[in-house]
Image: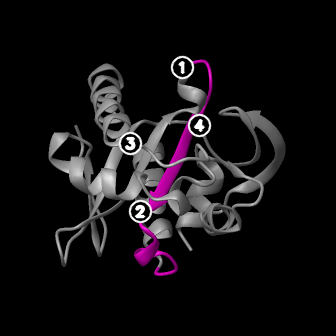
């Protein structure tokens, strides 16, 4: 399992030690608004951690807890996974942050590092990301990564804006 780092974050493969921080994140209605539409229970978070660990064992990638280096606090989480958890689909980037860390560049910082992992380590030819069409903050992160809007599609039981970037386009964009 790969731990990734950025200037301000350590991205640790999700495990039981992250339970309290992830539950604090996933139990907030404003965090889950565009994801499931409802806050997670503690049991939901425990089950999520178990699923994530199984995917790490199966694929060698999955969800990371975003740990702020300066405080040691879990401030969010993000992933590289198969879109809709189906290996027939391309790889997808995803993320969520605690509201007290919104608008500070953490999502872009973590997403850029996860994208580099997907292209450099996993050698994926294409990376996509989806968000609820009202989630302008996530769409902005996707655009900052150089992702291009593909259109509206149905994923995760909701209509989503879909963005994508190829490995070649990533190489050009990340060099800037």
Q: Label 2, label 4: how many angstroms apart (C-alpha)?
A: 20 Å
Q: Nearer the viewer, mark 4 or mark 3?
A: 3
Q: Label 4, label 3: how many angstroms apart (C-alpha)?
A: 36 Å
The numbered disc on residue 125 is: 4
Describe residue 35's horizontal placement relative to residue 76 as left or right: right
Q: Label 1, label 3: how many angstroms apart (C-alpha)?
A: 28 Å
In the rendered image, which residue does mark 3 sit on?
41
Q: Does label 1 or label 4 sit earlier along the sequence? A: 1
Task: Name the residue: 47% across, 37% down.
Answer: 123
Tell me the magenta residue range: 88-104
Q: Is residue 65 visible?
A: no
Q: Which SS class for mark 2?
A: helix
Q: Label 2, label 1: how many angstroms apart (C-alpha)?
A: 23 Å
Q: Residue 119's x, y, as percent?
A: 48, 45
**49 or 59: nearer the viewer:** 49
In the rendered image, which residue does mark 2 sit on?
110
């Amino acid at each position: 399992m790969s731990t990734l780092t950025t200037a301000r974050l350590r991205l640790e493969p999700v495990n039981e030690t992250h339970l309290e921080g992830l539950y604090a994140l996933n139990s907030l209605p404003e965090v889950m608004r565009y994801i499931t539409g409802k806050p997670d229970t503690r049991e939901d978070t425990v089950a999520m951690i178990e699923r994530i660990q199984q995917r790490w064992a199966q694929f060698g990638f999955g969800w990371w807890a975003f740990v702020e280096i300066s405080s040691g606090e879990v401030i969010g989480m993000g992933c590289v996974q198969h879109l809709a958890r189906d290996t027939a689909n391309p790889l997808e980037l995803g993320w969520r942050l605690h509201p007290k860390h919104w608008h500070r560049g953490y999502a872009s910082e973590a997403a850029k590092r996860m994208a580099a992992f997907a292209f450099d380590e996993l050698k994926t030819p294409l990376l996509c990301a989806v968000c609820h069409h009202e989630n302008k903050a996530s769409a902005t992160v996707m655009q900052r990564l150089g992702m291009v809007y593909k259109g509206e599609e149905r994923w995760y039981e909701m209509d989503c804006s879909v963005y994508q970037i190829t490995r070649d386009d990533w190489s050009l964009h990340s060099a800037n």
